[in-house]
Image (spheres, coloured by chain):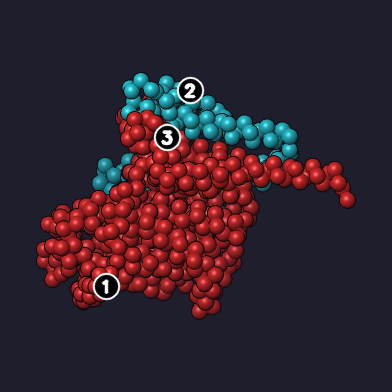
Amino acid sequence: MIVIAAVAMFDSRASALPDPTGTFPGGLGPGFYPFWSAAMVAGAALFVILRYQVLAGDTQGVFAKREAWVAPLKIALPMIVAVAALEWLGFYIVTALYMGFFARFIGGYRWYWVLAIAVLFPLVIYLAFERGFRVSLPKSVFYEQGFPF
Amino acid sequence: MEILTGFTDTLSNLGGGFATALMPFNLMLLAIGCFLGLVIGVLPGLGGTSGVAILLPITVFIASGGEGGATSAVIFLCGIYWGALFGGVITSILFNIPGEPWSVVLLFDGFPLAKRLGKPAVALASSFFASLIGAFIATVLFTFFARALADVALAFGPAELFAVFIMSFATLVGLGSESPAKSVMMIGFGLLLAAVGFDTITGAPRLTFGQLEILSGIDFVPVTIGLFGIGEILASAEEQGIGFVERMNAKVGLKDIFETLRELRKRIWTVVATAVLGFWFGVLPGHGATAGSFLGYGLARQYSKNKANFGKGEITGIMAPQAAADASAVGSLVPMVALGVPGSPTSAVIMAGLFVWGLQPGPLLFIDHPDFIWGLTASIYLGHLMTFVMCLLAVPLLAKIMRIPYAIITPFIVIISIIGSYSLNNSMFDVFITIGFGLVGYWLRKMKYPLAPLVVAIVLGDSTERELRKALIGSGGNPGVFFASPLAAILMILALVLLFLPLVRMLRERRSARTDTLNPS
């Protein structure tokens, strides 16, 4: 948090102070608001650190246990891979693969159920969003070849 | 005597309005509008504003070919708005993903009540009842005071509005159950995120680091979807394990409805007060339901006896913001029809419709087209009642969603989150923001940082800066403007008191601890 605040303060330092010369309307330049917001973050973060130096925090060691990060990682990794693949595979193929992956490897469903889930969910989303509400979702590289997804 | 004549005139006009709104064609349009709004509200990424905008072209045919003309068209569009107001809460409460910007605040207590305390039906019914009451109160105020209030609202300047926003932030610091320093840090972080992009006054890019995608700023919807929707999935994977399936009672009977009504009776004055304040906030041009809902939540928390329960499934934390949001939405129509100044983005789209149908919004609308005004007013009463009944009938079905197996519901929430963030601006960058903030949300949760101040600051950050700078521009850069009017001064002083409250509390605790050490008996 301190690093984020420091970067923001550095970036907006040019017009951080009230300007009485009349260059900016109302005496505040574009950097005033982000600079002091960042200063607020930095000040509060320093206070939290100092307080933790004096009093032992109740959040110390929360990531020490293996379960604290293994289970979330098992969920986060496929999600990150799916989002990264969106630009090439498009929304509908990614939905089919992602839903199918969960059904098979987390839910332990039989293959015919996996197939049904992988087909039905993207189809319903396609009908509701693309056809019903005219909301266009990311398409795959196959879209150019005439495929609807 | 004059007041009595005015009152009876209003009632007689309203009677005429009901006659118009109850015409079978208008009633059918209202029902279709409410249902479509409900569906739009449930789907993340499709807001009430975009729903109204998408269906605006249809209203041209309704206004020109229908028997009710422009009145039928506005009844249809407003039906979508009311439906979306109710529908937005469903995904917030059941999935922890905001269906609409104004239902973001329901993530704080709605989801914990549904999931952690196992009362999805009570959580949903609480929000529906609060919506109905909030809208009813606001519509009564709209009926009798629309024109008078529009004039007063114009006198509410930037300094007063800035003071209102500062008070909202101060409430989160001064009365929050979490560490005040952590709350301040989260508020600062939220304000910082809200400042990213073009500066609206000078046009200079801020904190963009040369990236074109963030020139238009970071929208709060992808951030909140990530913080709450994705963050919750990661947190529950750790706390309850992968594959965990809810075993809560999803049946809703009269018992649940009666329980909600009992809870509502205990909080009725809070709901009424937040509805009146929400309505007033909606009347102020440029804000609308989202800011109103956050204000309602902050005020309810400030005056609640159960402050410690907020964020853990407190029913007041659902009822108060929901009543305020609906009342704000109704209030936002006041400046639109009375002055031609839209009170919210959705009312701006509805106002565009007025121009398309050949009507000129403003004071003359009340004189030249009374049938339109009173038909609209009556349809607000009917539309909310209709949506309420639709929602209540659907509660048992909606609550069963919580029993869908983990292996289906978890990826489905991720997929819906992606749709919600992408469809906002057709931007992959927003999807990355959602996933990034999902990870950040998980970390913040683990480190016991409060998420509410962060979200409130992102939502209100832009408006706060805008009002601050408008006030200073108006006063030639003199900061004394924030204490110049009695109202602004009172609000600012109250905000300062609330900000320093934790410090006073800490000093008092320290003194009592020292006294205990000196007198151990």
The amino acid marked with disc number 2 is Phe
Q: Residue B346 in the image: x percent, y percent?
A: 29, 53
Q: Is residue B34 left or right of residue B294?
A: left
Residue B388 higher or lower than A25, as above or below: below
Q: Nearer the viewer, mark 1 or mark 2?
A: 1
* Residue B84 position by quadrant: bottom left
- Shade of chain B as shown in the rendered figure: red
Q: Is residue B514 left or right of residue A2?
A: right
Return the residue at label 3.
B480
Q: Determine crowd level at label 3: few under 14, some 14-19, many 20+ residues with C-alpha closer than 10 A.
A: few
Q: Earlier in the sequence, mark 3 or mark 1?
A: 1
Return the residue at label 2.
A10
Return the residue at label 1.
B1
Q: Residue B107 in the image: x percent, y percent?
A: 50, 55
In depth, the one of B212 and B470 nearer the eye is B470
Residue A78 higher or lower than A41, as above or below: below
Q: Which chain carries label 2?
A: A
CA gap, disc 1 to disc 2? Answer: 66 Å
CA gap, disc 2 to disc 3? Answer: 29 Å
The amino acid marked with disc number 3 is Gly
Residue at (50, 53) in percent of width and height: B298
In depth, the one of B105 and B46 nearer the eye is B105
